[in-house]
Amino acid sequence: MSKVKLFSYWRSSCSYRVRIALNLKAIPHEYVTINLVKDGGEQKKDHFLKINPFGFIPSLEVNGDNNQKSIIFESLAIIDYLENINPEPSLYPKDLIDRANAIAITESINSGIQPLQNLFVLAEIENLGGNKDQWAKQLITKKFKSLENIMTKTAGKYCIGDTITIADVFLVPQVYNAYRYGVDMSQYPTIERVNKLLEEHEAFKAAHPSVQPDAPKQ
Amino acid sequence: MSKVKLFSYWRSSCSYRVRIALNLKAIPHEYVTINLVKDGGEQKKDHFLKINPFGFIPSLEVNGDNNQKSIIFESLAIIDYLENINPEPSLYPKDLIDRANAIAITESINSGIQPLQNLFVLAEIENLGGNKDQWAKQLITKKFKSLENIMTKTAGKYCIGDTITIADVFLVPQVYNAYRYGVDMSQYPTIERVNKLLEEHEAFKAAHPSVQPDAPKQ
């Protein structure tokens, strides 16, 4: 397998997910920085639109059949692709009910929380005259109640029992955002406990925004 | 396989997705109505919380190992489960790049559009003093530009070439919402063309909100 190329921004929680999955599966990859905030966003500039005409970050450039380059985008599509080209360790539980619960937690973050606090929506909230930081904090606070409730039923050491799954890959970047917006995480003891353990895992540590090449120097 | 039980609301676009998938795979199922708007939402009442303690609609009740009942929720988790118990016809392309594109379109709807116009977010927009119908119309209009752009590259008769995939299952309910909010669909000729063809398909017709048992009588 030839090396894949990840187009990523250090603080993007969707890029963070893909970095974790690449690390868990130990897939060699090149890291290319795309600055989502400088000058209105590098993802909208010609040099990146030649690579991904849709301007999505994260994107993964891969060598497909006939050594032709293809670009894959949307974090879940990228992670599904990585699972297919490199099935072990699998991010999906074998038991179908555990698998359904892992995907349900993934989606409660992916479609239930993250979209409500991404850059695009926060700009729209400001246009409406709202306070974007307060909006993000308030929505994460509400939605984490439901997630905590689910995880009290499914979690062992991790989101689903004692094995790392796709749910954990999505959880940690969302909790990172929760801390950014000042959410009081002590309200969610299960989420907090699982997140702390995951943060100590090498694959998660190496994917942390603060250690990416494009993170601002402390 | 024993009959599964779908807890659905006629107008919920996430329930609509699951109805399409059940029909495409010809999986026998019982339809149970949960009214999301009456008296603050039947999904929050005790009799439903005994079935799904998290109060999510759609939910699918299935008989797992040892004939024990399990509840599955989040439309993508339900559809993934259906794909696993009933793999044919598959909703996922075999080619990995086509598969990634199908998931990318699915996610650009599932996490990129639908969450911004669901009941929970529209109520929050009203709390902010915004006009919820205008918000929904404006965001779908913006996001469909990007989706149209993607589909001009991937579509044949359907979202990905000439075979129905999970992307189509997600597309049709989202276009239904776009019409509800008065989005001018003539701006998106590829989306409009694919949607029209899908709407004529028996599996999609039978899943349409207007023909569900809980739809208001015309």
Image: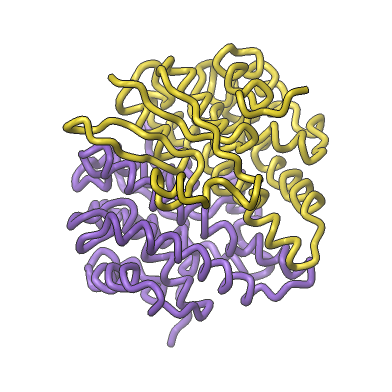
Chain colours: A yellow, B purple
Residue B134 vertical position relative to residue B51 in the rendered view, above or below: below
Residue at screen point 75% across, 32% down: A188
The furthest residue to the bottom: B218
Horizontally, is A124 left or right of A93 in the view?
A: right
Residue at screen point 43% across, 46% down: B76
> Of residues B139 and A215, which is closer to you in this image?
A215
Residue B7, image x and y in percent?
47, 56
Residue A60, image x and y in percent?
41, 35
> Of residues A76 and B67, which is closer to you in this image?
A76
Quarter of the image with the N terminus of chain A is top left
Q: Is residue B69 visible?
A: no
Horizontally, is B2 left or right of B53 in the view?
A: left
Residue A158 vertical position relative to residue A32 in the rendered view, above or below: above
> Of residues B66 and B173, which is closer to you in this image?
B173
Disc tally is: 0
Residue A8, image x and y in percent?
53, 34
Q: Is residue A103 visible?
A: yes
Residue at screen point 70% across, 32% down: A176
> Of residues A41 and A101, which is closer to you in this image?
A41
Rendering quarter of residue B208: bottom left
Residue A184 vertical position relative to residue B49 in the rendered view, above or below: above
Horizontally, is B166 left or right of A24 in the view?
A: left
Residue B170, image x and y in percent?
39, 57
Horizontally, is A118 left or right of A79 in the view?
A: right
Residue at screen point 19% across, 33% down: A65
Quarter of the image with the C terminus of chain A is top right
